[in-house]
Amino acid sequence: MIDKSFESPSAAVADIFDGASVMIGGFGTAGMPDDLIDALIARGVGNLTIINNNAGNGETGLAALIKAGRVKKIICSFPRQTDSHHFDARYRAGEIELELVPQGNLAARIQAAGAGLGAIFTPTGFGTALAEGKETRRIDGKDHVLEYPIHADFALIKAHKGDRWGNLIYRKTARNFGPIMAMAAKTSIVQVSEIVPLGALDPETIVTPGIFVQRVVETGAQASTAA
Amino acid sequence: MIDKSFESPSAAVADIFDGASVMIGGFGTAGMPDDLIDALIARGVGNLTIINNNAGNGETGLAALIKAGRVKKIICSFPRQTDSHHFDARYRAGEIELELVPQGNLAARIQAAGAGLGAIFTPTGFGTALAEGKETRRIDGKDHVLEYPIHADFALIKAHKGDRWGNLIYRKTARNFGPIMAMAAKTSIVQVSEIVPLGALDPETIVTPGIFVQRVVETGAQASTAA
Amino acid sequence: MNRLSRDQIAARVAKDIPEGAYVNLGIGLPTKVANFLPVDRDILLQSENGLLGMGPAPAPGEEDWELINAGKQAVTLLTGGAYFHHADSFAMMRGGHIDICVLGAFQVSVKGDLANWHTGDPSAIPAVGGAMDLAVGAKQTFVMMELLTKEGESKLVERCSYPLTGLACVSRVYTDLAVFDVGPNGASVVEMVDGLTLDELRRMTGVALTA
Amino acid sequence: MNRLSRDQIAARVAKDIPEGAYVNLGIGLPTKVANFLPVDRDILLQSENGLLGMGPAPAPGEEDWELINAGKQAVTLLTGGAYFHHADSFAMMRGGHIDICVLGAFQVSVKGDLANWHTGDPSAIPAVGGAMDLAVGAKQTFVMMELLTKEGESKLVERCSYPLTGLACVSRVYTDLAVFDVGPNGASVVEMVDGLTLDELRRMTGVALTA
């Protein structure tokens, strides 16, 4: 029997290793898998490369992971925010490396990894500092930059409901990076409000088919808070 | 008021022009928009470039369009089938040009067009006759072929339900190419079993958001038949 | 000379958004445009974090923090709206499906180059978000800004000195003093506030302007 | 010598598919493997036209022609299955998410090159479908075929003479006479039918074989 459900967040993240690359879903706090991140912090491994849209908000989730000093490098599009003070401090102290990626290229590179493409030519960023040193090409009258897929060892994702095969649905704009990160990571670990019986999710409306998910943990419904 | 609904298939295809490129959804007969194709045949324009997975089955839909002599070129992955005799005859007579594309590259190139990418490196087809003369590159130890997006002037799609903003849901495996063709064509024309009131489709389960659809025609429920 | 307020600039931008348009409003100043869209037009707002058909802010206490916009503010969804993931959302933007995006700017060049993501200050922490995608992907990119900095320097320039967001991507610039078209042929003045002359505007901006 | 029937080859392939595997069965002969998957194992079949969790054929008269497999046959969906579009489906395949795909073949080389889409006959109408995607994308690609052509020529070859589907993509070949591992080190015999010797197999195939 295929049963991808795990007892606890700590069991689900127990093999995340020192130096791993970890995608973390969420846009600001919407879709941030706080319980999985808390378990990762408790696990104690460091030197992590994190892929997320932001670099943490306030005191919880990714911000707490950064505060705990576990992040070596972050690949994101929008680190600087009014409440990104833990990242800001580490960055200014030279303790964290930043790879800044335009948001759509971040999404496209994650999707390319999940889809097994070798590289993509994207128009975004051409002629800017974020394309410096990158290969460019004019295609059909438009300039493009060559960008490579972003793979990861693990993805930590928050979804709404899941089943034991790993099928997922999301809630409102908390969907954001979840579906594409699930496709791009070797091991995708998902916290859901509720694990439902097989068949409870309509096959027409499953957003992430279970093939992209390795572990599901029920952590109960949690309201996101303002970023 | 945004109202993308059209009175009839013939009204919906009335500006498809001689020499246009037209994506047609469907895998075999599942998802084949027969009513729109019938209207296109009745309209009488020819020299069309058709993008579809196949090259027509039996006597209806794309097969009928080919039989009518309206297709100059077809871009597809699997033309030869037991019931593709109209294509077979035209092809053997040298009356139709064939661009054969591996099925996943077909999907990826259509998706790349919809997403505004300039080109993609894909591993599929490397070292085969279908990559002959194409640029190749070894990336991360794996050989890839450079493939370009497939755009089209029009897409003809069959969906299950739609609303006046063009939001769509599909039915079972008739979904196939619909969502990505809707994204890749300048003008996407969709036949649905039923046009439902705005709000009747759950925003969490809309498969094609209306931004990708220009026209919707209600043609009633129709059973697909065996290919 | 009758300088426009920020709300007045937003109202002026809103006037140019037609019925049926799909529009992305950048974070900051452009967000105000939503307040001035005519109620008799169906205009659909896209937010790059994954929704189409964005509605107004919810009543206080009614916020759902899983329903937010790109600026991470609580919003609502109109009847007929839809949610989708980030790759599909940026496919909408990069793929030319958005009719109009409205962005703020530090500088815009007469050719339509845009600088709006980084001041170039080496001590600043850079952040780009979706600005570069929006700039190159929308059918039309409008900029909305005050024409002059606090120090009186023109933000409409011959050539951007700040780091670029995109090349030749802006088509129209709305400011408190004038509306400009920009592009391959340089900048032309679409309209000016009452009491301003073309000569004064040329002097203020220091760039070549056609009427 | 006890040549395996097609059903017996299918049963042999099925034995190697573990619990929890995501599997794509190519059209034609490999479809038979589904009939031999042990009922006590959860094995999920993917069909590239857009479903995961493919179930058996429906009862006659119960067909829904919008629920078909890659061979355009009516199928069913298991409880827990899902539908998706073609780009996501081929992302599953190309992106290495399918554990095993089973394909038919005209020829397989000892290095694992596959030829299964075209005989090279210039008068034939070519058709490729998803074969090239499956060949390169799955974690493991198995081939299932009769070892010899009707004319007695080996389909396991040093180098394919038919047009290639993919290079160095096949890892294991199941035939009516033997099971082979193929790859960078050439072909090795995993098992043979009763009554067949390695020498006979070498003579039949004409390729170098290790035991």
Image (cartoon, coloured by chain):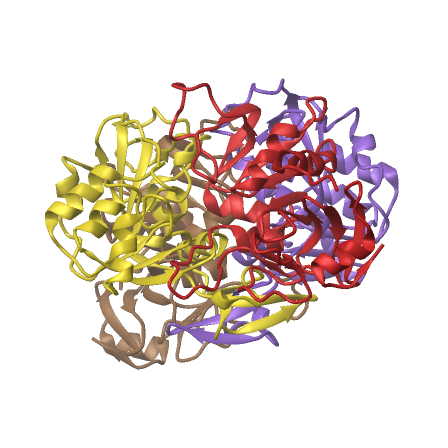
Chain colours: A yellow, B purple, C red, D brown
Judge by depth and name the residue closer to the eye, D189 or A193.
A193
Question: Is B76 in front, or is C66?
Answer: C66
The answer to which image quadrant residue D173 occupies is bottom left
Count of numbered circles on the image: 0
Q: Tell me if I can see residue A153 in this picture.
A: no
Instruction: Judge by depth and name the residue closer to the eye, B106 or A123.
Output: A123
B200 up-or-down from A46: above or below = above
Quadrant housing the C terminus of chain A: top left
Furthest residue in direction right, as rendered: B44
At 65% from the left and 51% from the top, the residue drawn is C147
**Residue at image location 20% in from the left, 50% down from the top:** A67
Q: Determine which quarter of the picture holds residue C16.
A: top right
Looking at the picture, does residue B116 appear above or below residue D70?
Answer: below
Residue D187 appears in the figure: yes
- Residue A96 falls left or right of residue C191: left
Residue at 55% from the left image edge and 43% from the top image edge? C26
Q: Is residue A49 left or right of residue A135?
A: left
> Residue B194 placed where, x, y %?
64, 21
Q: Could you tell me residue C131's position as x and y percent?
A: 53, 52
From the top left corner, tell me how far across and down residue C101 is, in percent: 63, 45
Q: Quadrant for the N terminus of chain A, please.
A: top left
In the rendered structure, the answer to whether residue B146 lies left or right of residue D191 reads right
Where residue A55 sits: x, y (%)? 32, 50
